[in-house]
Image (spheres, rainbow, N blue to C red):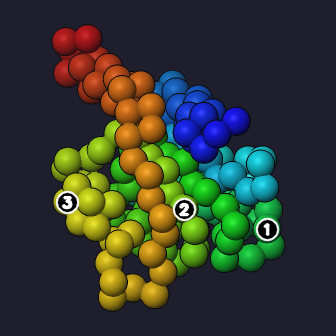
């Protein structure tokens, strides 16, 4: 399996997590952390379900991954997320020292990996992960579009 196929495979896992978020009324964003060919952290948005503004998919997945590794440094891992990380999540990614981040859909309103800000590439920070964007972008975007259309009553 080449790198692109591998990215698409793991993004499928993140998409499954995103569907879980939509199931309980949260914005459908999902994330997985992959280490040595296996998922060590999973998460989906749970802000509404938990009443917690920090309950983003990436934060949940990073917490699980850190617990699995026994360290706050989530090294030798890749984070896959269906939506470009926001500023909070990008900050958590930098602090966790994740070496690589892959995301699906861009977030033109709150994206902090190039759309609005670029926390992940900021030269002033001590860690800058490699990034890949647009993996299964149409599927990731379609989940969000359908969710918000339904919320507006036109879907």
- The quadrant of the rendering that contains the N terminus is top right
How many numbered marks have been drawn onto this rendered protein structure? 3
- The quadrant of the rendering that contains the C terminus is top left
Q: CA distance from mark 2 to mark 1?
A: 17 Å
Residue at the outermost top position: 155
Disc 3 or 2, which lies upstream in sequence?
2
- The answer to whether any part of residue 87 appears in the image is yes
Give residue 116's mark: 3
Q: Residues within 10 Å of mark 3 (few under 14, many from 20)?
A: some
Residue 128: give x, y in percent of width and height: 45, 75
Determine the residue positioned at 70% across, 67% down: 76
Give residue 100's mark: 2
Residue 94: give x, y in percent of width and height: 48, 74
Residue 134 drawn above or below residue 153: below
Q: Is residue 5 left or right of residue 129?
A: right
Q: CA distance from mark 3 to mark 2?
A: 20 Å
Residue 3 drawn above or below residue 71: above
Determine the residue positioned at 58% across, 68% down: 98
Q: Nearer the viewer, mark 3 or mark 2?
A: 2
As rendered, which of 26 and 65 lies closer to the eye?
65
Residue 80: give x, y in percent of width and height: 54, 48
As rendered, which of 60 and 138 lies closer to the eye?
138
Residue designated by label 1: 69
Q: Are the residues tagged 3 and 1 within 8 Å (C-beta)?
A: no
């Amino acid at each position: 399996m080449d790198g692109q196929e591998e990215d698409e495979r793991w993004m499928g896992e993140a998409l499954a997590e995103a569907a879980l978020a939509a199931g309980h009324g949260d914005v459908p964003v999902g994330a997985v952390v992959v280490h040595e060919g296996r998922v060590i952290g999973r998460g989906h948005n749970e802000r509404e379900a938990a009443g917690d503004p920090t309950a983003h998919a990436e934060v949940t997945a990073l917490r699980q991954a850190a617990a699995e590794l026994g360290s706050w440094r989530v090294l030798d891992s890749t984070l896959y997320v269906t939506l470009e990380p926001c500023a909070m999540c990008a900050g958590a990614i930098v602090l966790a020292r994740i070496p690589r981040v892959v995301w699906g859909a861009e977030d033109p309103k709150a994206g902090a990996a190039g759309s609005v800000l670029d926390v992940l590439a900021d030269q002033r920070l001590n860690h800058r992960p490699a990034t890949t964007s647009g993996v299964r972008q149409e599927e990731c975007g379609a989940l969000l579009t359908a969710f918000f259309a339904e919320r507006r009553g036109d879907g």
